[in-house]
Structure formats: structure tokens, C-alpha cells
Amino acid sequence: MAGNISFAMIKPDAVAARRVGAILAHVQQAGFEIRALRMVRLSRVEAEAFYAVHQGRPFFKELVEFMCSGRAVAMVLEKPDAVAAWRATIGATDPAEAAAGTIRKLFAESKGRNAVHGSDSDETAAREAAFFFPERELALLGWGAAG
Ligand code: IDP
Ligand code: MG
């Protein structure tokens, strides 16, 4: 059964462009409950670990540079079938291919600097949330290692 929780991030391009408020408004208008939220500044090592699954891809170095270039906002979002719902709300990786009205269509600069992150499965969502939020907080959401 699909879970109700996804991990999401507002990436450094959108934070630098002062789009945090507009994107959070979009998140809430799309029916997501913001269950946890934190502004973060990733080190290079943290960015490499967060995106470890992409190690070896041609864009990996550029991705890591970008993700540690400035502040980002980490969030846990709740909605029925949250992972699929959030990916539908953000749109395709490349804003040129993203559907009208999606967050990436509205706010992304390019395929690399694409405004927001979304988990690709329930398992990834749990791992990514645990990367940024203490177990105690995730347990309060009835989720994480304890939930
Ligand atoms: P996703 O964020 O839509 O799940 P992934 O394929 O998982 O897309 O890629 C992770 C991130 O890596 C993307 O959001 C984007 O920032 C970056 N990325 C992916 N493909 C490219 C590319 O071809 N050029 C530059 N950056 C890319
Ligand atoms: Mg992905």
C-alpha cells in the first residue's frame, strides 16, 4: 500500500531566488500537510551522500556542487499516496518537459537547477527524511524507524 508521507526539498536555486514562500503556498494549495520543515545548508560530503544513488552519472559533480551552493529547505509532506502525488505536483525533472502548472514548470531554471526535490518511493522517502530530521521527530509523526 502506498504511504502517506514524502520527503521534499526546495533546492538552492529557488531559495536564492526567494521562491520559498511561493513554493510553500503551492505545496499547501495542492493539499499537502507540512509535517516537518527545516532550512539546511548541505556540505559537499552530505550532498554526495544524499545523492549517492547518482554517483557515476555524468551530472553527479554538477549536482553536488549545486546542492551545496546555498541554503535549501527540507520538508516532510503528508497526503494520501504522497510520493506519487508530490511527483505529480513538481512535474518532470526537466522543466522543459514538465506539465503546465507544476512547480518545476513554474519555478525551475533548468534540468539541473530544478527548484525542488521529490522522493521516488516510500523507502527512499523514509531514508531521505531520516537524513534531515531526528528519529525522535519522525517517531512523533508515527513514522521512521519507530513507526
Ligand atoms: P528527479 O529529481 O526528478 O527525481 P533524478 O533523475 O533523480 O531526477 O535526478 C536527480 C537530480 O539530478 C535532478 O533533480 C537534477 O537536479 C539533477 N539532474 C538529473 N539529470 C540531470 C542532467 O541531465 N543534467 C543536470 N542535472 C541533472
Ligand atoms: Mg530522483
Image: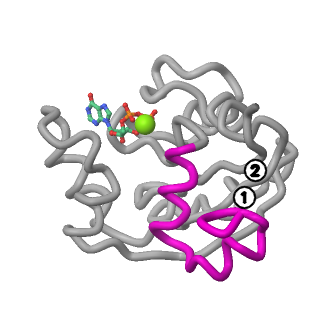
Q: CA distance from mark 1 to mark 2?
A: 5 Å
- Would you name the residue on which mark 2 appears? 27
The picture quadrant where one finds residue 54 is: top left
**Residue 76: image location, x then y, percent:** 67, 60
Q: Is residue 124 magenta?
A: yes
What amino acid is found at the position of numbered circle 2 in the picture? Val
What amino acid is found at the position of numbered circle 1 in the picture? Leu
- Would you name the residue on which mark 1 appears? 24
**Nearer to me, 21 or 87:** 87
**Residue 11: image location, x then y, percent:** 46, 56
Q: Residue at x 27, y 55 (%)?
A: 66
Q: Residue at x 28, y 68 (%)?
A: 46
Q: Is residue 82 left or right of residue 111?
A: right
Identify the disc placed on residue 109: none
From which residue to which does the magenta span run?
123-147
Q: Is residue 140 above or below residue 131?
A: below
Q: Is residue 78 magenta?
A: no
Q: Is residue 56 above or below residue 65?
A: above
The picture quadrant where one finds residue 89 is: top right
**Nearer to me, 38 or 80:** 80
